[in-house]
Structures are given as C-alpha cells and as structure tokens.
Amino acid sequence: MSADPSHVGVVLVAAGAGQRLGRGMPKALVRCAGRTLLEHALEGVLASGVSHHVCVVVPSGDTELRAIIDSLPHGTATVTAVDGGASRPESVRAGLAGLTESIQIILVHDAARALTPPQVFRSVVNAVAGGAAAVVPGIPVPDTIKVVDEGIVTATPNRASLRAIQTPQGFDAATLRNAHAHAGVAENVTDDAMLVESLGIPVLVTDGDPLAFKVTRPHDLMLAEALVRQAEEVNR
C-alpha cells in the first residue's frame, strides 16, 4: 500500500561530528566523489518520491550545510533545516518539531547512509501505510557474532535470526512522537526503533540493501566513492 507524499515527513539526521572519519568537519560536509554526503543523501530521499516534507537536522550553529540545502533543487518537496542537539535522540526530536502535526508517517534517516537506494524508502513507507506502527530495513549478518563480557565469550547467537539494521526507519507519526516523549535522557539509544521497542510495540523488519551502509570510517568513504564513480561510468 502506498502513502500520499503530502502525509509523509522525513527527518534527515546530518548533525554528526564525524570524528571517526577524521576529516575535521561535520560528516555530512565530507565530499564523496565531488559532492558532500548530505547532497548524496538528500538526493536519495527526494528521488524516492515518498515525501513532500523533509527536515534536515544540522550541527548547531551550522551555516555551510544550510547553504547547500538552499542551493539544491527540491522539486515538489519542502526542505527545511533545524539545529541538532547533543545526542542523536535530541537531534531527532528537533527534526520532529520541524515537521507539521498533519504528518501521518515519519521516516528517520541518517545522512551517513548516503547511498541508500530510493526503493528502500518506498518499501518502508509502504509497510507503515499497510498498518505497521514501526518498520526498519535490515540485511542478514554474514559473520558469526559473539556476546562478550570482559573479554570472555558468553554466548553465540544464531546468525540466521540476526539482522544488521539500517535507515530509513519508518513509523506511524503518533507512535514515534509518543516514544520520544517518554524517552527521557535516552542514553545509549542508537536508533529510534529502540525507543518504540521500549513501549512494547512490535517493529517490523523489511529488506534493506547493502548500498545503505553507514559511512563511518575512512575505508567506508573509499567504498562509497568507488561505488559512486562506478555508477557514473555505467550511466554515461
């Protein structure tokens, strides 16, 4: 089931400092094959056509990312920017405040997952429109995973039941707003699905995509650049 793009909002989180990437600038400003990660990420959101309302969360006091946002073509979508907070949950809450109350479905997406294909956005939105309160894309985990306590293995989960979770994560708007309202300080929260899970609400997992990997370290950026160059060659 598809959703009316006018009823879908996207919070694009681009407030990360990018310390592990080691470029001395906010991660969203780092260039990948000649364009910033923010540009790649925003292009994917808009190309999906799922939303007419995008709120980009940028580092507090930023002017460069805001200028980039203003310079890009947005088509029929309205793209705004708000300052983020000291933690990811605080930044997402700032993005939620930047969306109108009439929004019925909200996607939360990390700009660091800059190459996420448009189809991932569509499948997540369609799953929420079909009745799921919370939806996350995920891919199978190829490695054996160990649970470790003080250097000692305490368990080996069955990897058949494990998924590496990506973004965009999609939610019924009321469910997500309620989860954040009850989150408190929300320390050690790494994604919004965790907040919804804490309320006892089921989270549906749909198929993710290997291209939705997170650019975190230098080798991730090298891979992203190679993939963008390869796609450019194919499309020439």
Image: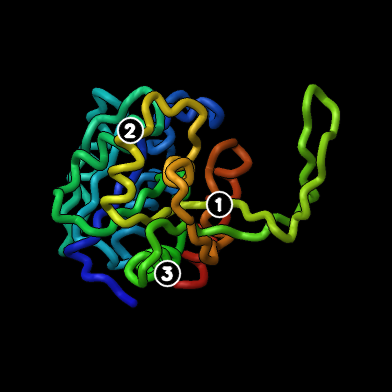
59 vs 154, left or right, is left
In the rendering, at what x and y percent does residue 85 appear?
32, 26
163 and 181: which one is in front?
Answer: 181
Q: Which residue is mark 2?
A: 91
Asked if residue 35 can be seen in this view, the reply is yes
Q: Is residue 142 above or below residue 156?
A: below
Q: Is residue 29 above or below residue 106?
A: above
Distance from Cα at disc 2 to Cα at disc 3: 25 Å
- Mark with earlier residue (1, 2): 2
Q: Which mark is residue 123?
A: 3
Q: Amino acid at mark 1?
A: Ile
In the rendering, at what x and y percent does residue 42 appear?
32, 52
Q: Amino acid at mark 2?
A: Ser
In the rendering, at what x and y percent does residue 173 appear?
27, 53
Distance from Cα at disc 1 to Cα at disc 2: 19 Å
Quadrant where the C terminus sits is: bottom left
Instruction: Give neighbour class at mark 3: few <14, some 14-19, many 20+ (Cα, 10 Å).
Output: many
Q: Amino acid at mark 3?
A: Ser
Q: Which residue is mark 1?
A: 165
22 and 118: which one is in front?
Answer: 118
